[in-house]
Image (cartoon, grey):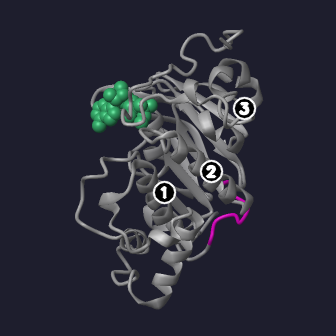
Amino acid sequence: MTSTSPSVPARASAPPIEVNDASVVLGSNLILDAVDLTVYGGESVALLGANGSGKSTLVKTILGLLPVRSGTVRLFGHDARERRTVPWGRVGYVPQRVGASSGVPATALEVVRSGLLSPGRPFADRGRSARRRALEALDAVGLADRARDHVQVFSGGQSQRVLIARALVRSPELLLLDEPLAGIDRASRESLAVTLADLRRRGLTLLTVLHEMGELSDVIERAVVLAEGRVVFDGPKSELAHDHARHDELGHDRPDDCEHEHEHGATEPAAHHAPVLTTSVRQAGGVK
Ligand SMILES: Nc1ncnc2c1ncn2[C@@H]1O[C@H](COP(=O)(O)OP(=O)(O)O)[C@@H](O)[C@H]1O
Ligand SMILES: [Mg+2]
């Protein structure tokens, strides 16, 4: 019945993300087990879970980078397996950050412009409009004045924002971020929260992988928690508030009077594996 050609959009109102009963096997292990997740336009969803629970795997599966053993994944109504039909320009992805020292020397502007490249458009990063769009994207993350600086000298938080700008340069409607807070200092976490809040106001749909909501709590409305590849919670952030109170209440309402509690080793990306709801989803009285 549906004779969709690549040029014809699927249902205009299709949700940005629809994962139905998706299972993923890597090696011989079942990494995602019958996962259901629909993210609607304009939503901001946190994907939480302990280390190794399958968060990055789910993000890569949503992007069609890993195959499903069973079930389906749709992006804006298009089957992610049929990669040529997916409107990739509507999708931005900020991968889990790798060391800032890796890579060739490049300015922030060059890195962001590279986000315009795609297999069918080998020169898309050239020219005046590419430059303008890259500057706009850098402006959106508060780095317009650093466009000519080499990213090698950037802090972890600034590098993270450059990567977000690169994902934004094609004006996506959906942005997936994998652990954007990991390994960056508190000031950067806060400016990242401002950046994401701004993107939300512009109507972007956000799916953000987090260990804990931390500074991003105000930007999140719904939480999905994975444990051992299964969705063990999916609901309003407020229903998780008690479990996360220890993290959530810091640094938001009283931004300046609680620094001492909130610095967990800015230079240790994975040092604080605060288990986000593994077994005790409803543990009460989390405030110390
Ligand atoms: N390519 C792979 N082959 C086999 N196992 C993998 C592969 N990638 C990830 N895994 C395993 O899948 C599980 C989930 O990993 P991941 O999605 O990266 O977790 P998270 O992002 O929640 O920390 C882990 O146990 C990890 O060891
Ligand atoms: Mg991960």
Residue shown at 52%/47% (left/top)?
188
**Residue 128 at x, y percent in the picture:** 46, 90
Q: Look at the image and give the residue range highlighted in magenta.
A: 9-15
Q: Which residue is mark 2?
A: 206
Label 3, label 2: how many angstroms apart (C-alpha)? 14 Å
**Amino acid at the residue labelled 3:** Lys
Task: First in sequence, mark 3 or 1: give its number.
Answer: 1
The amino acid type of the residue labelled 1 equals Arg
Is the Cβ of the residue at disc 3 closer than 8 Å to that at disc 1? no
Q: Position of residue 272 (x, y in %)?
A: 44, 24
For the residue with label 2, is its CB less than 8 Å from the closest atom of ligand 2? no
In the displayed structure, 180 sits above or below 286; it is below
First in residue order: circle 3 vs circle 2: 2
In the rendered image, which residue does mark 1 sit on? 161
**Who's the residue at 24% across and 54% down the image?**
102
Looking at mark 3, is its residue's CB closer than 8 Å to ligand 1? no
Indicate the amino acid at tag 2.
Answer: Leu
State how far apart marks 2 and 1 are (Cα): 15 Å
Which residue is tagged 3?
237
